[in-house]
Image (tube, rainbow, N blue to C red):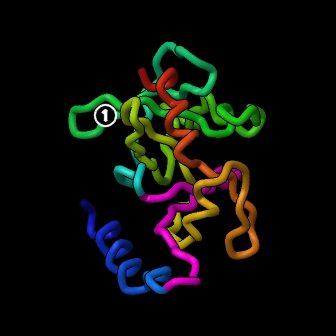
Amino acid sequence: MSQWLANIFEQQASRRSGDDEGTEQLVPALTIEHRGLRYVSDFSYLSEVIENALIVPYPEKHSAHIGIINMRGAIVPVLCLAALFGQDEKCCLGERDREGRPLKYPRMVVFCSPAGSFAVGASHVKKCLVPREKMQQCGEIEIEGKVYRILNENFFLRMEEMVA
């Protein structure tokens, strides 16, 4: 586990709330921002965050597939969250840099779902604590004045067709 993740877990444990009856239990979460879109996921599905991963294009199985990355010898599909949620105009499918090479994201967030691992690109990734009850709901949540789409257990269970 990276030192960054270890620090987040340590900080979360020291700030844990909800041990007393009547208080809201907070869980560690990760906010993901890219192209003006915002998502939040609890840490239970997070595998790691990779800096500057190179995406290699491959024939698409689904419109949300961008390509693949090599993660220490494992081939991990890269998905576009905007396309998954029907916001294709914000998606970056097929984008290349000025020299025509496959696009590099500043960060690649790798998730491990029941169906397997997959990655999503992100401009900004940030840790936070959110109420457990809200993370289990579908829809959106406000964090620090910004609205985030929740990537909850139902989202990760639906990923089977995308990563298989």
Question: From where the camera sits, is residue 51 visible?
Answer: no
* Residue at image location 44% in from the left, 82% down from the top: 19
Mark 1 surroundings: few (<14), some (14-19) or many (≥20) residues within 10 A: few
* Residue at image location 34% in from the left, 66% down from the top: 5
Q: Is 137 rendered above or below residue 29?
A: above
Looking at the magenta stretch, what is its main secondary structure?
strand
Q: Amino acid at mark 1?
A: Asn
Report which quarter residue 77 is drawn in.
top left
Q: Quadrant of the C terminus?
A: top left
> Which residues are the magenta region?
21-43
- Badge 1 marks a residue whose secondary structure is strand
Can you identify the residue that label 1 sits on? 70
Q: Nearer the viewer, residue 102 or 38?
A: 38
* Residue at image location 70% in from the left, 36% down from the top: 85
Q: Is 131 rendered above or below residue 31?
A: below
Position of residue 103 measured from the top left corner of the image (x, y, whole percent): 52, 37
Q: How many marks?
A: 1
Q: Extreme front residue here? A: 21
